[in-house]
Amino acid sequence: MNIDLLRGELIRLTVEDPETLAKLVSQWSADSEYSRLLDWDPARRHSAKNAQKWFEKQAEDDNSYLFAIHTLEGDHIIGEIGLDGIRWTHGDCFVGIGLGDREYWGKGYGTDAMKVILRYAFTELNLQRVTLDVFEYNPRGMRSYEKAGFVLEGRQRGMILRDGRRWDVIYMGILKDEWLRNNA
Amino acid sequence: MSINSPLFEGNFIRLGPIDHEKDPEIVSRWTHDAGFMRMMYTEPARPLSPWQVKKKLEELEKFIDEDKNIFHFRIRARSDDRLIGFAELTWISWTNASGFIRLGIGAPEDWHKGYGRDALGMLLRYAFTELNLYRLTAVIPAYNLAALGLFTSFGFVEEVRRRQALERDNQRWDLLHLGLLAAEWKERQK
């Protein structure tokens, strides 16, 4: 039994009060690139109060597991990661990740957090697969997800219109069998 | 197509609003047919009483009012206005002009009669000429061969294959995303 289920090499996952995450997310939303990597809806500023209401709803949703990402070194909260839309009878869910603190981009923190949440999804929640979508203009994200074991499952052509051109929404997935093989 | 072409009257069917008095009884019957429910929904098939359906339809209409990103129609027979199914454009993202499309014909005796084909043709015209969408996505389980056949016959192509995303009858099934661009649809109208 792995007792440090939520701890990786660089980060650990915790659950924080809605108020704590709301304040951070409200700050992070100042970075429009961060918002545009996360969502195809228009980038906008969220008040801490508004974000808190959203996190309170998430906290009560049994089909959603949302975590804060802490660095092991220095114990900073640098982002969020969550499983949502869990369909228990099919063992499928979506994962979403965002590193709000761009100091930590491209250094392996996101990949490490993804590896930790996959272990949680497959060995504690006993899910059968995990799905994500990533936008064509986010190659750094795609590389990170490949490193964590995700494989390409297709692309919705031209789903997003931004900066005057159309971009694909790319789907990736990982099956439990694949994860077990990768981690044997 | 011109500005006065009817958008809601097809060859066999018309697209109408919810009838909160009469629809619940009929929809309740559909929910007792696991075959229909498993084709339409990934949630576990679960029969609903007319009262439960009535509540759900009221919630749906409230959601339509508040969210502005869903267009929901009831499919009715032109001959006698009888309810035969539903058709909707949903999760519309206005800034990206992208949306999702769903449709279902409820009773087995109404299948294979061209109602779905009629309704899908009208819904596509509505999506591309009234809502001015750029593209549509249909999410269909790999075992729903009727839907896959219908949507591909209108030019939808497989874009995403979520491998083994569903489990039914002790078997894993892929969940497919089919896509159609407005430009592709327009090309086919010539």
Image: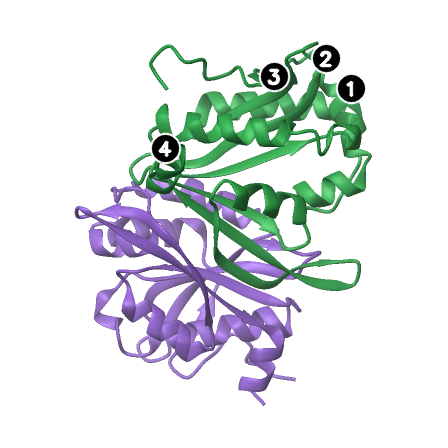
- Image colour for chain A is purple
- Nearer the camera: disc 4 or disc 1: 4
Q: Amino acid at mark 2?
A: Lys
Q: Tell me whether the residue at label 1 lies in contact with that at label 2, contact meaning CB atoms closer than 8 angstroms.
A: yes
Tag 3 subunit: B
**Residue B38 appears left or right of A118:** right
Coloring basis for residues: by chain
Circle number at residue B25 = 1
Q: Amino acid at mark 3?
A: Ile
Sequence-wise first label, 4 or 2: 2
Can the viewer see residue A81 in this picture? yes
- Nearer the camera: disc 4 or disc 2: 4
Badge 3 and badge 1 in a common chain: yes
Chain represented in green:
B
Residue A130 % position (x, y) = 54, 65
Tag 1 subunit: B
Q: Which residue is mark 3?
A: B18
Tag 4 subunit: B
Q: Which residue is mark 4?
A: B190
Q: Hey, which residue is sitting farthest front in the picture?
A: B190
